[in-house]
Image (cartoon, rainbow, N blue to C red):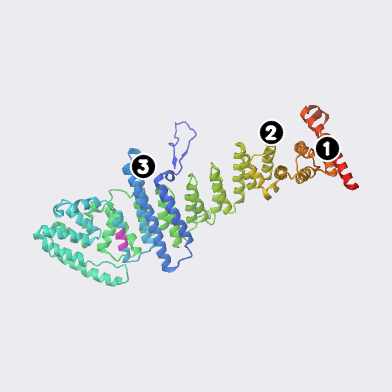
Amino acid sequence: LLDLPPPCGEGRPSSSCVFVVRKDQDIYIQTLRKLFNESHGIFIGLQRSEEEFAGKSRKTQLVQVSKNYRSVIRACMEDMHQAAVSARDPALHSQYSTQVSILSAMELIWNLCEILFVEAAVAGPLLLRLLDWVRLHVCDVDNMVREVLSSENPSKHELFWNVVDVFVLQGRMDEARHLLSKEASANPTSVNMCRILDDLMKKMPVPSLGNTQTLTEMELKWQHWHEECQRYLQDGTFASNSHMESICKILLGDENAILEKKELMTTWYHFLVTRLLYSHPTVKPMELRFYAQSSMDLFLGGESSPEPLDTILMAAFEFELHQVIKECSIALSNWWFVAHLTDLLDHCKLLQSHNLYFGSNMREFLLLEYASGLFSHYSLWQLGVDYFDHCPEYGRVYLELHIERIPLNTEQKALKVLRICEQRQMHEQVRSICKIMAMKALRNNRLGSALSWSIRAKDAAFATLISDRFLKDYCEKGCFSDLDLIDNLGPSMLLSDRLTFLGKYREFHRLYGEKRFSEAAKLLLMLMTAHIAPCSFWMTLLTDALPLLEQKEVIFSAEQTYELMRCLEDLTAGKSDKQKFQDDDVETMKVEMLRLALARNLARVIVKEGTLEGS
């Protein structure tokens, strides 16, 4: 939605225009969370069951899915209504009330689409479905009905005949007859008229949902009944009671008589269904467009122009499916409705031929838009992943783009995102997430976590950097942090030379701690001679050799001692005179101590080896 400034006109200085783009606010309304969460489960179930049903069972299943969606809308509407009632803040009350109206309109449209497109009701049952639709959604008169029925003497209530009219207009004949019996009991002069009208209502032919009668049989019965109503009206049977006469005219389908009850019907589509009930009960689906347009014109009578809801319903009655989706996309405040309705209609094989000019079909386009909106929410983004999964053409591309923008606030959230990427073999995104988390951990000086993430990312350069930090910390503190991680590197240590050295150096300390001095000495020498250890760390390794050189038992052989001597000389020879001059006394002392220890060890080894040879 764009808040546009007025256009620049003559005499007005031109200036840069600022466009304020607002996010889809609906996903942040707490009460609508139920709509998004529960409909997600219905959506996934529909995708998975596509191959399980065929023929009639498939159609039955699709109708049930549609009803499930409607039940979620209605449940949310009831929750929103309760929130509006309990809201003390006027602004909040207004917001909730608006949402109730929107949800009510959504259910109204969805229910009509279910009848016309999903169930595809045929002539006969079609009218019964439309009657149920009107009764469910036109409930403005319910309070009036309750008020009359709860009074001590309903037939004397000022709204009594209004309630009878409402029942007749909605085809609720049993309830209308029940009220007429109260009028007959209270007013003996009208007993005969009430009996005749009751008999007409009782005998009124109604289409059957089963195959118990053909349309021709139904039309013949209805014609005979219609003629009987006509006779009573022409005979003046109800002339002494204007209310009953008016009802008889309604039964005959008199448009003027029905329009006189305009305030009781409240909407043109109620008028349409009532008109069909009493003038053309076997209406065929393709005939609805003509009756719908004329009913809206008669009902509005040029007094008011159609609202967006009227336009949508008219498009449905005209079977202009794409127009319904287009108008709903414009009128409704989020993509939830059109995305799920279009997906359902696509499963009904009603949108197969409609591809958009830029490559994707309408179903996928709307699902992509809806899922993209979910990704802007801090927790609903998880639902969006599944919607992208079921968009075969562009779903993966959208998921890759959106998942990289998820703020990784916590390690738990990062692991959740990572699992999603790994399940879908999104290797590039896996590496990106691991690098981001490794950098965050490194900035917070959490070296163990940083190393773990860099190993998971298979980032050799970063693993080398963190390994250097571990070694630097060891030099400064004399001990390793995160021992569990380093001890269990396993094959991961082969990711980089420095990581290999870190793992092996830690193994040296473990062997030394377990007093396995011979193995520790071999490993230490191997780290230096195989050039696994960085040159900058050689002095530390040679210093670590001192305790082994000073052991009572000779650990290093003559050959190994010579190797250590060579390493020491290579280390000192590699430094320039200036560097030597700058070395502190501690380093110089270390070198002298090492030379002395190595010389003593060599002497001990020669004596020992000579003694062994002599024996």
Q: Residue under circle 3?
A: 95
- In front of the other: label 2 or label 3? 2
Magenta stretch bounds? 128-132
Q: Residue under circle 1?
A: 598
Label pair 2/3, CB-CB below 8 angstroms: no
Can residue 466 be seen in the rendering of this structure?
A: yes
- In front of the other: label 2 or label 1? 1
Q: Is residue 154 left or right of residue 294?
A: left
Residue type of the residue flagged with mark 2: Glu
Q: Residue at x 39, y 57 (%)?
A: 68
Check the image and report above or below for 228 versus 588: below
Extreme front residue here?
Answer: 615
How crowded pointer 2 is (Cα within 10 Å; few <14, some 14-19, many 20+) is rated as: few
Q: Which mark is residue 476?
A: 2
Q: How many marks?
A: 3
Name the quadrant containing residue 596: top right
Residue type of the residue flagged with mark 3: Gln
Can residue 405 be seen in the rendering of this structure?
A: no
Residue at mark 1 to residue at mark 3: CA–CA distance: 85 Å
Check the image and report above or below for 194 versus 604: below
Q: Secondary structure at mark 3?
A: helix
Q: Residue 157 at what x, y percent from top left?
A: 15, 51
| First reached walking from the N terminus: tag 2 or tag 1 | 2
